[in-house]
Amino acid sequence: MINLDSIKEYVQEHKEEALQCLVEALQSPSPTGSELPMAITVKKWLDKIGIPVQTFEYEKDRPNFVADWNGSTEGKNFLFNGHMDVFPATETDDPTYNAWSGEIKDGAVYGRGSSDMKGGDCAAIMAVKFLKEMGFDPKGSITLNFVSDEESGGAMGILPLLEEGVLKGDFGISMEPTDMGVLIAHGGTYPCKIVVYGDGGHAAKPINPDDKDNKYGGEDAIKKAMKAVAALNKLEDEVISKKPATFCGQSHLAVTKINAGIAVNNYARRCEIMIDRRYMPDETPESVDAEIIGALEAVKKEDPTFTYEFHNHYEPDTPVFVVPEDSGIVKALDETCVELFGELPKHITKVGGADASYIKRAIGTEMPWFGPGTFKIACADECVTIENYLNCIIVYMQTMVKMMG
C-alpha cells in the first residue's frame, strides 16, 4: 500500500537520483529564447519515466512538452505546469557560485533558475517517476507540461498550446516558487505601450515649426513623451498608489522603458513609452485602459498638438488569478503538509503572475502554486535547499495519491 511513510522512504532511498536530475537541469543554460539545452535535459528525464511525450515547437529550438501518464481506469486529469526558461545570468552582485554550476554546498543546490523554477520542474518529474515505479495506478491521467517562453509572456509556449486545445486539467499544481507555501491568488500584469509623435530635423539648430514636415508645435517626440511620462507618474502618485491594498497586494504603474531617435544629431520624431501596470482583483483591463487614456487626454487638452497611440496588448498580459481555498486541490495540499510537517502551509498571494493564470482562464483548471524555491530569484547565488526540494517531491507524490487514488 502506498502511503506517506512508504513515499518518504522511497524518496530517501532515491535521493541521489533526484539530486542528479536537478543538477543536470541547472547545468543546462536556458535563458528565455535559448531553452534547448534545458529542453534536452527535461526530455531525457521524461523518457526515463516511460510515458508518451508530445513535443510542440512554435519557434525553432524552443520546444514545449506534454507527457501523459494514463491510468487503467477513467477519471479526472491532474496537470503539472512548469517553465524551462530562466532569466539571463547577468549579475549586479559578485556571485559566489557560477550561474550554471549546479553546485551543491551547505545543504543547497546553486544555479540560475534553481528557485524559478527548475527545482519545482525536477520535483514534479521525480514525483511522477517515483510514484510510477512504486506501482501507483492513477484513476484518470496525470500530465507533465513544460514550456518555453514563460518569462516573456508565453507567445511561444503556453498560449498556443491552449489555443490548440492541447492541454486538459481538472486540477493541478504550478511548480512556481512558494517556499513550500500554497499560492492561491495573484494580481494581473498588464504591459502597455504608448507611441508619441513629434517634429524633427537636424539637431544643430532649433526645430522650425513652420517646416513642411513638422506639425506638432515645434517639439520633438522626446519632449512630447516627457509630458506623457509626467502625466503617468502623476496618475501613479495621486490615484493608483492611493487605492486600497487588496489581498493580492497594491496596484502599481511604472514607466519601465523608453525608446526614441535614429541618430544622435537628429530630433526624434517618434518615441515609445513602455508601462508595467499591476492590477488587482477589484480592477479590470478596461478600467486600467480608461485611467491611462484619461491621463494622456489631459496632456492633449493642455497641448492640442500632442499626438499618441495607445497599445494595450503589445505583449501578453497575465490575468488576475484566484483559486478558492476550499477547492479539492488546495485541501489536498493542506492535508499533506499537515501530515508531513505537522502544520498547515501558509496560504500566500503576490502581485505578479505565471502561466497558471492563462490555464485557468482557458480551461478552468484549479492550479495553486506550490514549489520548493523562494521569491529570491534572478539574483546572484540563486539556490534551492535540498530539504525543500525532497520534501516537495514527497508533497507532490502524496497529493497525487489523494487526488488520483
Image: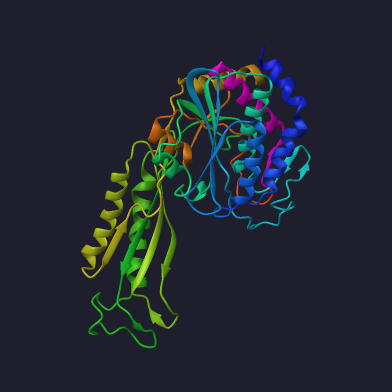
Q: Quadrant of the N terminus?
A: top right
Q: Position of residue 195 (x, y in %)?
A: 33, 64
Say which residue appears at 63% left-offset and 36% top-offset: 46
**Is 358 displayed left or right of 228 in the figure?**
right
Task: Decide whether residue 397 is among the magenta residues.
Answer: yes
Kindly identify the residue that appears in the image at 34 percent across and 72 percent down: 221
Residue 74: give x, y in percent of width and height: 48, 18
Would residue 169 be found to the left or right of residue 304 on screen? right
Any part of residue 358 in sight: yes
- Front one among 159 and 272: 159
Residue 57 lies left or right of residue 287; in this view the side is: right
Question: Start and end of the magenta stretch?
Answer: 382-405
Picture quadrant of residue 20:
top right
> In the rendered image, is residue 147 in sight?
no
Residue 26 screen position, x and y as percent: 68, 46
- Measured as percent of width and height from the top left, residue 302 is found at 23, 65
